Image (spheres, rainbow, N blue to C red):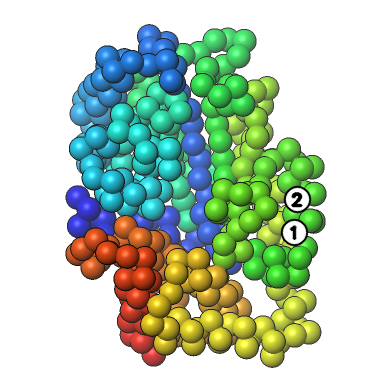
Amino acid sequence: MFEQLLTQSPFWSQVGPSADVVMTTRVRLARNLPSLPFGSKMDETDISTLESIVHQAVVTSKYFENAQFVSLKDCSSDDRRFLRERDIITHEMELNNNSSVVFDPKQQYSILVNEEDHIRIQVIKPGLQMLLAFKLADEIDDELNKYISYAFTDDLGFLTTCPSNVGTGLRVSAMLHLPMLTAAKNMGEVIKLVREYQAQLKGIVHDATKTVGSMYIISNKATLGKSEIDIIEEIDKVISLIIDLENDARDDYYQHHKDVLEDMVWRSYGIVTFSRSMSYAEAIEHLSLIRLGVVLSIIKNIELSVINDLMIHIQLSHLQKFAGRQFASSEEGDAFRAAYLRKIFEDKE
């Protein structure tokens, strides 16, 4: 299974609509079973029952006939980390032996079993495709619901472990690449928009004040009292406004500081091409500038999808699987990462 995943890039790393700013769109539906206790109140019998119910639904339905069902207790820590790096599972599931996951070969969707909720349906699409991602998640939700009853009340909607998810159980998010707004220290305008639309923003290192590679995740806050379409339209609107801000910042900076920007981009390209050691954070920072250079046609010999793939492949577990061994130290991993990047960029010359 992992060999196949390693040789096949996830569907969502391709170039989608508004890919110059929006890297991916994610939709998640939270569902729970009325017959089982929620979250931390589950005992071993409850956990086993939940996994059996979901597994039976998946093997019974023809919809999921090509899907993989993986119990994380059967995976090594490195394999679980690999699945998390692919966004097939979450960080919380990586640390939880009692979770399991169902995912399709193209990695368009995954069904998370016993994460925070009993079931979380997750769909990731390239670029800005919120409605399309929701339609697939909704389709999977309807299929599962043929075999599994959900905890639902007419006054509250779908019942979830976290009160902020009660209602539709819908969480929508997008990963945004905002290098010029970050460099110009204009993220205040973005934060103002996010608050105005009652959304939330965080860096990819899960700290609201920090990020790596000028990449941020924007998502909705609450779901109660709103329809799925209302939530999607609100997030779509604020993302479109942020796209305009970033593109305006890029155009303005490139028009007035072309030499400076091209120097920044080509310096990163040169460092990645010739470096002998590189940490993950440093690599992401350089790939972020190279990605900007590709979008602005400063760099013409490499495709945007290649950069998107590299941002996945330079993570630790991916590199260890490429190498066929566990690294003895962080220094060994940094050296292999640099060699891996050199090979990719040398092949593009």
**Screen quadrant of the C terminus:** bottom left
Within 10 Å of disc 2 (Cα), the crowding (few <14, some 14-19, many 20+) is some
Nearest the eye: 231 or 330: 330
Q: Are marks 1 and 2 in contact (CB under 8 Å)?
A: yes
Q: Find numbered disc 2 in the image and state the secondary structure of the residue it sits on.
A: helix
Examine the image and state in which quarter residue 272 appears.
bottom left
Residue 128, which numbered label?
none
Label 1's element?
A: helix
What's the residue at 28%, 51% (across, down)?
A: 78
> Which amino acid does the dot numbered 2 rest on?
Ile
Left or right placement of residue 95 versus residue 268 in this view: left
Asked if residue 61 shows in the view, the reply is no
- Residue 273 visible, this orientation: yes
Q: Is residue 299 found left or right of 80 in the rendered image? A: right
Q: Which mark is residue 187?
A: 1
Image spot of residue 1 (x, y percent):
19, 50
The residue shown at (34%, 49%) is: 81
Towards the viewer: 133 or 292: 292
Residue 43 higher or lower than 104, as above or below? above
Q: Spatial distance from mark 1 to mark 2, Cα to Cα?
A: 6 Å
Can you tell which quarter of the image residue 273 is in? bottom left
> Residue 203: x percent and y percent?
60, 53
Q: Which residue is mark 2?
A: 191
**Residue appearing at x 73%, y 46% in the figure:** 194
Q: Amino acid at mark 1?
A: Met
Give above or below for 278 relative to 266: above
Q: Residues within 10 Å of mark 1 (few under 14, many from 20)?
A: some
